[in-house]
Image: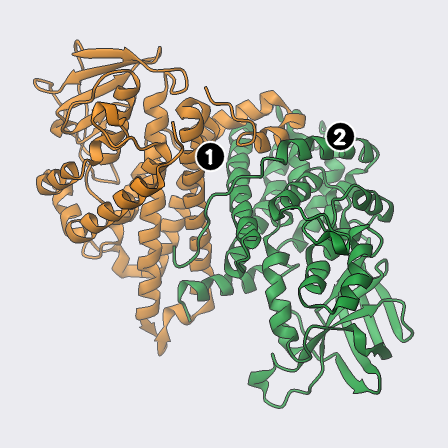
Chain colours: A orange, B green
Amino acid sequence: MSETNDDLRGILLEQVERLLTDRSGPDLLRVAERGEWPAALWEEVEALGLPLALVPEAMGGAGLGWGDAVAVWQVLGRHGAPLPLAGSMAAAALLAAAGITPPSGLIALVVPGEAVPWGRQAGHVVTVDNAGQVALHAAAGLDWQQGRSLPGREPADRASFGTPQAAGRLPDRLGPEAALRAGALLHAAQIAGALEAVLAMAVEYANTRQQFGRPIGAFQAVQQQLALCAAEVAAAGVAVAQAGRAAARRGLAGAEFEIASAKVVAGEAAGTGAAIAHQVHAAIGFTDEHPLHLFTRRMWSWRDACGAERFWARRIGQAALARGGAALWPDLTARDETEISA
Amino acid sequence: MAGLRFDLRDTPATAPALRAELRAFLAEAGKDWSPMVRAYSWMGFDREFSREVGRRGWIGMTWPKAYGGHERSALERYVVLEEMLAVGAPVGAHWIGDRQSGPLILRLGTEEQRREFLPRIASGELAFCIGLSEPDSGSDLASLRTRAEKVPGGWRINGRKVWTTNAHLCDFMIALLRTSPVTDPRKKHQGLSQFLIDCRLSGITIRPILDLAGEEGFNEVTFDNVFVPDNMLVGQEGAGWEQATAELAFERSGPERYLSSLPLLIAALDDLRAEPAAPEVVGRLLARAATLRQMSLSVAGMLQDGKAPAREAALVKDAGNDYEQALPEKLRDLLDPIRTPPQVQEMLGYITMVARSYSLRGGTREILRGIIARQLGLR
């Protein structure tokens, strides 16, 4: 599989960017938080072929890879797109990898133990078991227990799944934990995007809000905090891009270290970045009226989804401790130099 | 993000072979390095080691062969730097010449200066220090007062530089000096020039300033009517500020801005196996190391492409300094002082002390964050 398809990726990113600039935003986020499905936006997203973007062309998709996916997911996060599109893209990719032609419409990706974002709207549901067996379930007739995430306030539902309509086995490079890893990657990428939006809002506000006869952004105390926020935003962006590249090269299983790192760094950055942005916005950012919380609340939920920082840090930490001090640096530098492609 | 870009870069195809060569060399060369030597890393000074590094072609790697260089890529050089730092090699005798003084001479020096200095830097023979800070000029560097007055055939220098790392051991200093008096305080960046100064010239007094660990690391250098010939001016008279700031992307972007304390993690790791809190702490440190490494590589890649990513470099240095300072503190939380082997405890002790310098040298945290804030559009 090619690592990226630069032309296609560029075109797709531009289309997503344009669509979301026109159609997404705080108003739609508020509508979605009331539990109303943004049907019009989903239709446009489908018209662009986004849900099947990671599916090979032979199965009706665009044939993009995980690295491209991360770039798209980052744009979704930056615009606060209130759709479970990232999960649907990942679910379709896993189906295709298991030899099942993905259906059209919203496919919910089930991560073991976690509620399913917008499960109630899904046409189909994808599960992955401990043996790497992928199952496709029709959603019609499922008894969804509706809920919502907190503090994200995104619809998040639970159901039990019966006999699948199709099943197949994932190749080893994707592995039995493919849903968890894909989920971690897509949440980290959306955090990285949302952080960009949050930083931009905070900078804009600091340059506009006047106190003591000048913009608050003229005060070093505020500048130093926003600079720290910018460093966290940059780190999250690099960490997720690195994880996307690794997954494109070595599959989700082979990219475990990079995906874990991305979830850790993005999760830490979400905490630090949101705290700084709220401090800069002060009381206005604490209101329902201001859009800042539409992004920060989602980041706070996303950092907990599919393994929080602690979960992933323990995994890679344990692996490093088992390998020992002498292997630490060689392991860190070898990953992209000795291709472990399966 | 706000005009700052960090595109992913790969290390070159030659990296694995280069690493293998370096690791074999460093394992042998470093078998007797004390915890203190490793803790000081690129502040440490070992001429014999630097000559050997030069003999192996690992100094001035990107420079033209005509000047003693090896015409390899900036990213190959990056591989060499990070391998040296990961083991805490005492690279101080060639680090500044390789990173800063050599590239400056190559870019702006006269043909005579290039032939005179570059081959001897690349062989590990000549050690350089940087004369920037003064007693009254630290972060406000452009307020510096050490002056060079024009005299027949050269310049007469009077004044004082401080915090000059390893000046007492170095052969040459690249100094930023005032060559025209300040007439308008708003234009204090004008009238500065860079000079190559032989540290053994008459009129120069070098007084070591002991650091907090009791080591002779940095110095006060006094110039009392020191005569420097015309051919030691580097670049253009009066353009010193622009020249010196152009160096900053090189000075601030390297792996030494996040790796200074990594040798401690490597040394301590095996003793953390029984500590229940260790996996999470180590995992978080590794996640950040991998991310900072890619950010640092990204800046190195931009430099290789001929760009001047000074602001990206400031961001990576700031984030890297936070990391290399936090690392010893986090490990200290995990290490039991009674059961930790003495050499690990000793390295922790030294790194705890010298870590204070990480966010001071090469631009303080506050200055770097000011640069980032301006890039964000804050005034």
Q: Which residue is mark 1?
A: A261
| Letter of the chain that mark 1 sits on in the rendering | A
| Letter of the chain that mark 2 sits on in the rendering | B
Residue located 41% across and 19% down the image = A173
Q: Is residue B203 left or right of residue A279?
A: right
* Same-chain check, marks 1 and 2: no
Query: In the rendering, which numbered label is found on residue B295?
Result: none
- When the figure is inspected, residue A304 is found, relative to residue A13, above or below; the finding is above
Q: Looking at this rendering, what residue extends furthest in the front direction?
A: B66
Q: Is residue B73 left or right of residue A280?
A: right
Q: Looking at this rendering, what residue extends furthest in the bottom direction?
A: B183
Q: Position of residue A99 (x, y in %)?
A: 27, 15
Amino acid type indicated by mark 2: Ala
The residue closer to the viewer here, A154 or B353, is: A154
Residue A180 sits in quarter? top left
Q: How many labels, in total?
A: 2
Q: Is residue A35 left or right of residue A178?
A: left
Asked whether residue A74 appears in the rendered view, the answer is no
Query: In the rendering, which numbered label is found on residue B24?
Result: 2
- When the figure is inspected, residue B160 is found, relative to residue B210, above or below; the finding is below
The residue closer to the viewer here, A116 or A94, is: A94
Residue located 67% across and 31% down the image = B17
Characterize the local packing of mark 2: few (<14), some (14-19) or many (20 or more) Cα atoms within 10 angstroms: few
Amino acid type indicated by mark 1: Ser
Asked whether residue B306 appears in the rendered view, the answer is yes
SS at badge 1: helix
Q: Position of residue A294 (x, y in %)?
A: 23, 48
Q: Alpha-carbon distance for marks 1 and 2?
A: 29 Å
Characterize the local packing of mark 1: few (<14), some (14-19) or many (20 or more) Cα atoms within 10 angstroms: many
Q: Position of residue A332 (x, y in %)?
A: 57, 32
Q: Position of residue B49 (x, y in %)?
A: 83, 43
Residue B239 sits in quarter? bottom right
